Amino acid sequence: MVRLALLLRRRSEAAHALTLTLRFAGGSTWEKTRRLGEPSHRDDDLRTVAYQLRGAAGLQRGRLTGLTLTGEDLRR
């Protein structure tokens, strides 16, 4: 999340949504997108949405093999 925020600031862009993609052992995936109230590249704004996405995944026990957080609907 911090890397994403830094990359967005370097590019003078702001994300209007974040997508969290989780990959599990066995090849299954889970993906969810959540929109921000307004486009942002601030750590705190992106962190809040990233935590909401993680909570929505309902992770308890599982073999997580990959995690990707992507900024969507980028604005300059």
Image: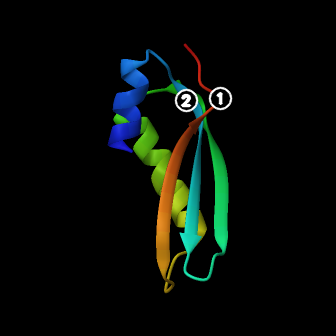
Residue 64 percent location from the top left of the image: 48, 75
Q: Viewer-proximal residue, 16 or 4?
A: 4
Residue type, mark 2 in image: Ala
Disc 2 packing (10 Å; few <14; some 14–19; many ≥20)? many
Residue 37 percent location from the top left of the image: 59, 32
Please determine whether, in this image, residue 59 is positioned above or below residue 33: below
Please determine whether, in this image, residue 74 is positioned above or below residue 30: above
Q: Is residue 33 left or right of residue 69?
A: right
Query: Of marks 1 and 2, which one's residue comes earlier in the chain?
Result: 2
Q: Name the residue beneath numbered marker 1.
A: 73
Q: Viewer-proximal residue, 71 or 50?
A: 71
Element under label 2?
strand
- Which residue sits furthest front? 27
Spatial CA distance of label 1 from label 2 is: 6 Å
The residue positioned 56% from the left and 65% from the top of the image is 22
Q: How is the image coloured?
A: rainbow
The residue positioned 52% from the left and 55% from the top of the image is 52
Count of marks overlaid on the render: 2
Residue type, mark 1 in image: Asp
Q: Is residue 8 visible?
A: yes
The residue positioned 45% from the left and 46% from the top of the image is 48
- State which quarter of the image contains the C terminus: top right
Contact between marks 1 and 2 (CB within 8 A): the answer is yes
Q: Is residue 42 visible?
A: no
Q: Name the residue beneath numbered marker 2.
A: 15
The residue positioned 39% from the left and 29% from the top of the image is 7
Disc 1 packing (10 Å; few <14; some 14–19; many ≥20)? few
Residue 18 percent location from the top left of the image: 57, 42
- State which quarter of the image contains the N terminus: top left
Element under label 1?
loop
In the drawing, what numbered circle is on residue 9?
A: none
